[in-house]
Image: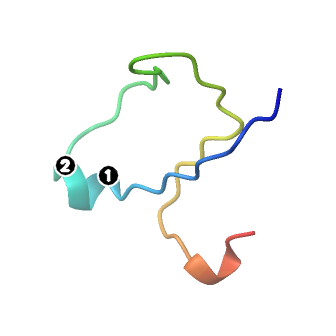
Amino acid sequence: MQLEWTVVTRDLWEDFGTFTRTGIAPTAMGGAALFDRIELLQRFDESLRP
């Protein structure tokens, strides 16, 4: 079976405003998902994306 990857980049502060993160629970809505990597960064440099 061939899997296709979807890269999702979110700016949590821009999208949701100021908040305090107390945990993380990767959840697939509507079906199965494989999480290869989750990064929480202070800054994201698009030029460094593989």
Amino acid type, callout 2: Phe
- The answer to which image quadrant residue 24 occupies is top left
> Which element carries disc 1, helix, strand or loop?
helix
Q: Position of residue 22 (x, y in %)?
A: 36, 27
- Farthest-out residue, front: 1
**Image height check: is 2 above or below 41?**
above
Report the front residue among 15 and 4: 4
Amino acid type, callout 1: Leu
**Image height check: is 7 above or below 42?**
above
- The answer to which image quadrant residue 21 occupies is top left
Circles 2 and 1 in contact, beta carbons < 8 Å: yes
| Residue named by callout 2 | 16
Q: Position of residue 42 (x, y in %)?
A: 47, 63
State the residue at coordinates (22%, 55%). 15
Neighbour class for label 1 at 10 Å: few (<14), some, many (≥20)? few
| Residue named by callout 1 | 12
Res. 29 mark: none
Report the front residue among 20 and 38: 38
State the residue at coordinates (59%, 48%). 6
Q: Position of residue 45 (x, y in %)?
A: 57, 77
Q: Is residue 43 left or right of residue 4?
A: left
State the quadrant of the C terminus.
bottom right
- Farthest-out residue, top: 31
> Which element carries disc 2, helix, strand or loop?
helix
**Image height check: is 25 above or below 46?**
above
**Image height check: is 50 above or below 3?**
below
Q: Is residue 39 left or right of residue 29?
A: right
